[in-house]
Amino acid sequence: MATKGYNSYHGRSPLWKKILIVVLVLLLLGGGVFLYCQNHLVYDENGQVRLELPFLHKKEDQTQQKPSSDTKDDVDFRREEPQGPVIETIGARELAANALETDVSATLPTDEKTVVVDVKLADGTFAYQPSFQAAGTVGSAVSRENLKKLTASDQYVIARISALGDTAYAKAHVEDAGLLRTWDQWLWYDYSGECWLDLTKPLTQSYLKQVCKDLTDLGVDEIVLENFGWPAVGNIPAVLVPDGTDKPAVITDFLKSLRESLPKTTALSVLLSRNAPENSGLTPAVLAEFDRLYADPSEVDLDALAASMPSDFKRESQLVQLVTTAPASGSYVIVSD
């Protein structure tokens, strides 16, 4: 039943009122924006007008003030990789042949910080038990633990190996690794009755890398290659060298590959005898690839050797004399009796 005299429904607001309200709001907003922009109109020197809004400049300023990732105040937590071994003047002592049969690290004089130890001989035998097993590898019954104890001490440990003079491995791998003679393609023997390995053969290179890697895994700081290159003493015309062999190039390429397989901090050196470089392939350019040159002054003219090296060769630290008493200057190794 409807209420008398009163109707609660007044109907919808006219459409024109809604439109009017929207138009008024837009006019107010537009007027506000116009007044705001009037304060930020800038005339340049040519009379042209441009609008500069503060909030846009604020964003640009924040972008410009953002610190660069390479500013001096930034802390660089990257660890620099070592570029190579540190070659300093050394005064070393050669340990006895049976040194690794005991814990030699416990008996070394405290005033001597560098030692040389023979770990592989010309007959192919090792002075310790290597970690790898290969036909022709003659390991010692001596535990590798004594060598590990030596390298774990505060001594700078130099391991000397007969690199290519290796009778045992040559006899076990005549065709694949042995240095052969011309007339019957059998093993060549030097004046000491030992056989050599042929550096042009892949098996020789992989074996020598394996030997050096085993030593660096045990922690030695430097490796000295003895009997390295081609033999230059003995019946040299009988040595079978493939036609076209560039001995210096073969040695250089191998040294590069060997270094890549070893830690960057491991020094790689060579022991020279009276071998003539033109026969062994160890030319001055090749010798410059080594970190140190070791030589007996009674067999090698050290002055002539140093003079043949590049201008950046540092004789005091890179040329090591094998002597019985310490010289007045330069690097040296006091050899054992």
Image (cartoon, rainbow, N blue to C red):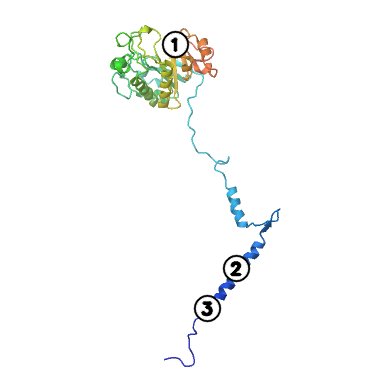
In screen coordinates, is 307 left or right of 250? right
User: Residue 123's x, y, as percent?
Assistant: 33, 13
Q: Quadrant of residue 34?
A: bottom right
Q: Quadrant of residue 252?
A: top left
Q: Nearer the viewer, residue 77 or 241?
A: 241
Sort mark 2 into few (<14), some (14-19) or many (20+) by Cα contacts within 10 Å. few
In screen coordinates, is 137 left or right of 32? left
User: Residue 38's x, y, as percent?
Assistant: 66, 62
Residue tagged 1: 278
Residue 333 visible within the image? no
Query: What's the distance in space between the residues labelled 3 and 2, CA to CA?
Result: 22 Å
For image coordinates 28% across by 17% down, the residue present is: 172
Sort mark 1 into few (<14), some (14-19) or many (20+) by Cα contacts within 10 Å. few
In screen coordinates, is 37 left or right of 191? right
Q: Going by the picture, which residue comes out furthest to the bottom?
A: 4
Callout 1 amino acid: Glu
Query: Tags 2 and 1 in contact by the CB under 8 Å rule?
Result: no
User: Residue 43's x, y, as percent?
Assistant: 69, 56
Query: Tags 3 and 2 in contact by the CB under 8 Å rule?
Result: no
Query: What's the distance in space between the residues labelled 1 and 3, CA to CA?
Result: 110 Å
Sort mark 3 into few (<14), some (14-19) or many (20+) by Cα contacts within 10 Å. few
Residue 62 visible within the image? yes
Under tag 1, what secondary structure?
helix
> Which of the labelled discs sits on residue 29, or is there none?
2
Instruction: Please identify the quadrant where the C terminus is shown.
Output: top left
Q: Nearer the viewer, residue 160 or 200?
A: 200
Query: What's the distance in space between the residues labelled 2 and 1, CA to CA?
Result: 96 Å
Callout 2 amino acid: Leu
Callout 3 amino acid: Leu
* Sooner in the amino-acid sequence: mark 2 or mark 1: 2
Residue tagged 3: 15
Frontmost of labels 3 and 2 is 3
